[in-house]
């Protein structure tokens, strides 16, 4: 499937976008507040959704509150559009809105994602919606919710730096490779969710609006377009992203994030782009093997 | 130049846990001592010589009267001064030399002796060297310098204490039997130290049980019981 | 003798002023009508039996508890801060910058899951230090100062002895060079010989850094060796205060006489 597909008419048994209008308004209010205070976690009245919490209910509620008839939705899971979860969520919205869905990054107006930011740079007319399992970047260090809120409020972030310090002391480098904490707008530390740290630099000054939803934890937060997002580091141990010795086996890209794939019963493995749309487009453009 | 002026000093102890009994130890004491003098406090055992010395140091609380000490070109009354003022005076002007060493256990001898210099901001290296010189003079061999004095003999501990006290002269020094129980050789070193200090302008007030020592150091004497003004030796 | 040294020292303003401070718990008195001043570089001891109100007083001073009445003022850059009325952010900022608290149990003051270096470095990172090498250098330096082998920088505190943990806690507190340190029975759970070494270390550090300290202890020997001035508390009230050696050698109050006669100091 490469073209945008249109499903005529939404399932009449549901309200448009599944959520009732009051709930959408509530979510939108929370999102407005989140946009106004970049990186700050705003509580919201998370609803029961027709899938288990922890499977993207936060992201789905944001998408449901935003999506309109003119929107075109793309859903990615582990960078791919064709995994079970991505397909299910895309079908869900197709059914409850009757709106268009796509697998092409460039065509989408709303991209709901877990684990990745698309390789193709996003535009100002696009919204990136993240599914967030754990919105609190300080949680592993400080179990008390009261205390973590205070730490955010008073900008007491030494402890987060201690975590990076401990990594370097123990492993010689910062061993955190995903959910690598970022400083948003030089004020709030936020978790970029389980995206690889490879994607962190894409968040910085991104033209698209970035929204984060945690259904189980009942929090949303946001990074408005063109906001400074800095990955935490030390002067003498600067932030770096992952790199690979070889290019993508399929499209030959040296710039994208690669997944290791086992291709036969003998354990042979290849490295290919995790962003399937990006990889496919490059191959169609005549790049790669 | 007077360094200490004592006027009408009385001291009594109230023993609350022994039926509030009151012991009147000193009554109407008055004397003065000046720079370059060594004033000997006299009186029979139990007359209150040590009590008086402790009053001068601010270690005992004065019941009545004033104890003026010249500190930083001012007269300050130890009897009424704030605690922190007394601490300042002790740090720079007034020191107390007893025969007992009271220090934190496990601290090395050399560190104990250089302590007063460090407290005045002398560099660690210089302080240690001067401490070594002073210990040698008092016949404490270098092999003991790195050890804590807790294991030393009584006489050695006493000499460590004297070394610490004489390493940095204060303008006023109070001496409480510093030569008691020392052998003749070491006693002579202490007498030398006392006379050197006096000649350099220190005002010394002391208790010595040994008349021979008194004669070698005294420039004036004050008898507590007769409470007479000091008379020249 | 350098006379300018002490005239300068004496002209200083107090660092902390406490006026008629009381803390009530309903009908019960925590402490009542406490007044004193603390100057830079001074070590004040608070002694008394358990329940005498010394810990309540310390908690109020350290802004961990609110007094019911009275004033606690801290000198800060030429002005007086009303400590109990400080807004939360200011209070927390002061706690990181100007204050240090050494707990009796090092586990209350250390992060047990974080290496020795991380424990010492946290306050530096709080204050914005972002150079890993520099943090390591300072942490090693402080380990040496508190007499822990700097090569143990990456070890967890749980692998340290009680005395080492306490020294690590002290390094963690002093690394940010606070002006005022509160200590609650700092040598409490330690062997006598370990205590002695720690006392000497504390005294040297406080002397070198010119820190003012308030130390709560029930141990008069600790008070004598470590403090300049002493406050004796009983039933929530300060019954006697003054020079440490004067209070211990010539106690005026019946209770202090009892206290000092009960133990050899």
Image (cartoon, rainbow, N blue to C red):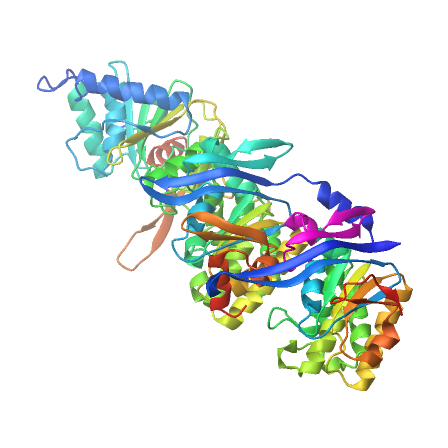
Residue B59 placed where, x, y %?
65, 60
Q: State which quadrant residue C156 falls in.
A: bottom left
Q: Is residue B218 above or below residue A202?
A: below
> What is the quadrant of the N terminus of chain B in the image?
bottom right
Is A82 displayed left or right of C67 in the figure? left
- Residue occupying image coordinates x 69% and y 76%: B146
Picture quadrant where residue A61 is located: top left
Residue at the extreme left of the image, as rendered? A13
**In terms of image quadrants, where is residue B177?**
bottom right
Residue C7 in the image: state x and y as whole percent: 77, 45
Residue B197 x %, y %: 86, 66
Q: Which residues are magenta?
A: B58-87
In reply to whether residue B69 is colored magenta, the answer given is yes
Residue C187 shows up from this direction: no
Screen quadrant of the C terminus of chain B = bottom right
Towards the viewer: A276 or A89: A89
Going by the image, does A193 lie left or right of C38?
left
Residue B67 magenta-highlighted: yes
Which residue is pictured at 45% across the width and 51% down the height?
C54
């Amino acid at each position: 499937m490469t073209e945008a597909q249109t499903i005529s008419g939404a399932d009449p048994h549901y309200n448009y976008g599944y959520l009732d209008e009051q709930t959408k308004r509530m979510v939108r209010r929370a999102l407005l507040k989140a946009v106004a205070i970049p990186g700050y976690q705003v509580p919201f009245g998370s609803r029961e959704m027709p899938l288990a919490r922890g499977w993207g209910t936060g992201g789905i509620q944001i998408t449901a509150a935003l999506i309109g008839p003119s929107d075109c939705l793309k859903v990615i899971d582990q960078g791919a559009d064709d995994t079970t979860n991505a397909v299910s969520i895309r079908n869900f919205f197709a059914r409850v809105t009757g709106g268009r869905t796509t697998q092409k990054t460039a065509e989408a107006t709303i991209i709901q994602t877990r684990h990745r930011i698309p390789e193709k740079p996003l535009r100002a007319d696009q919204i990136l919606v993240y599914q967030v399992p754990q919105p609190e970047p300080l949680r592993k260090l400080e179990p008390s919710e009261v205390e973590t809120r205070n730490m955010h409020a008073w900008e007491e972030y030494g402890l987060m730096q201690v975590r990076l310090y401990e990594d370097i002391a123990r492993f010689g480098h910062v061993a955190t490779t995903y959910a690598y904490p970022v400083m948003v707008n030089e004020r709030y530390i936020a978790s970029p969710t389980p995206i690889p740290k490879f994607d962190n630099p894409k968040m910085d000054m991104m033209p698209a609006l970035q929204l984060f939803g945690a259904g189980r934890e009942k929090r949303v937060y946001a990074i408005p377009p063109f906001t400074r997002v800095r990955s935490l580091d030390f002067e003498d141990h600067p932030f770096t992203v992952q790199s690979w010795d070889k290019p993508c086996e399929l499209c030959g890209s040296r710039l994208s994030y690669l997944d290791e794939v086992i291709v036969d019963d003998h354990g042979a493995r290849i490295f290919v782009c995790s962003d399937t749309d990006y990889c496919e487009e490059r191959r169609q453009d005549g790049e790669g093997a | 130049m007077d360094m200490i002026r004592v006027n009408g000093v009385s001291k009594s102890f109230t023993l609350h846990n022994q039926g509030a009994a009151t012991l009147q130890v000193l009554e109407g004491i008055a004397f003065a001592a000046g720079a370059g003098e060594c004033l000997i406090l006299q009186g029979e055992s139990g007359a209150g010589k040590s009590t008086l010395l402790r009053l001068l140091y601010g270690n005992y609380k004065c019941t009545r009267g004033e104890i003026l000490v010249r500190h930083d070109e001012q007269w300050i009354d130890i009897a009424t001064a704030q605690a922190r003022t007394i601490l300042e005076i002790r740090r720079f002007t007034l020191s107390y030399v007893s025969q007992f060493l009271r220090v934190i256990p496990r601290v090395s001898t050399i560190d104990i002796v250089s302590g007063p210099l460090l407290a005045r901001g002398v560099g660690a290296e210089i302080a240690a060297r001067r401490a070594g010189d002073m210990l040698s003079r008092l016949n404490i061999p270098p092999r003991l310098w790195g050890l804590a004095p807790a294991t030393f003999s009584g006489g050695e501990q006493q000499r460590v204490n004297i070394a610490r006290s004489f390493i940095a002269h204060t303008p006023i020094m109070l001496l409480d039997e510093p030569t008691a129980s020392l052998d003749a050789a070491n006693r002579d070193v202490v007498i030398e130290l006392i006379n050197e200090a006096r000649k350099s302008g220190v005002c010394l007030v002391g208790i010595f049980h040994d008349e021979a020592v008194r004669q070698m150091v005294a420039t004036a004497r004050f008898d507590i019981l007769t409470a007479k003004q000091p008379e020249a030796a | 003798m350098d006379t300018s040294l002490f005239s300068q020292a004496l002209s200083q303003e107090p660092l902390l002023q406490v006026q008629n401070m009381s803390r009530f718990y309903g009908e019960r008195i925590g402490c009542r009508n406490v007044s004193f001043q603390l100057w830079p570089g001074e070590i004040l001891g608070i002694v008394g039996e358990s329940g005498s109100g010394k810990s309540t007083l310390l908690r109020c001073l350290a802004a961990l508890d609110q007094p019911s009445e009275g004033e606690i003022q801290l000198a800060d850059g030429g002005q007086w801060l009303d400590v109990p009325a400080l807004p939360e952010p200011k209070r927390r900022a002061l706690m990181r910058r100007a204050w240090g608290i050494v707990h009796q149990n090092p586990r209350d003051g250390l992060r047990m899951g974080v290496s020795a270096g991380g424990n010492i470095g946290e306050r530096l990172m709080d204050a914005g230090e972002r150079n890993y090498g520099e943090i390591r250098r300072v942490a090693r330096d402080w380990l040496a100062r508190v007499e822990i082998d700097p090569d143990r920088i990456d070890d967890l505190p749980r692998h340290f002895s009680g005395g080492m943990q306490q020294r690590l806690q002290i390094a963690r507190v002093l690394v940010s060079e606070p002006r005022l340190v509160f200590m609650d029975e700092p040598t409490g759970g330690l062997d006598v010989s370990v205590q002695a070494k720690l006392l000497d270390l504390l005294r040297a550090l406080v002397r070198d850094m010119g820190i003012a300290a308030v130390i709560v202890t029930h141990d008069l020997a600790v008070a004598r060796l470590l403090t300049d001035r002493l406050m004796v508390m009983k039933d929530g009230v300060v019954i006697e205060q003054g020079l440490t050696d004067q209070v211990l050698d010539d106690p005026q109050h019946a209770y202090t006489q009892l206290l000092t006669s009960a133990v050899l100091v």
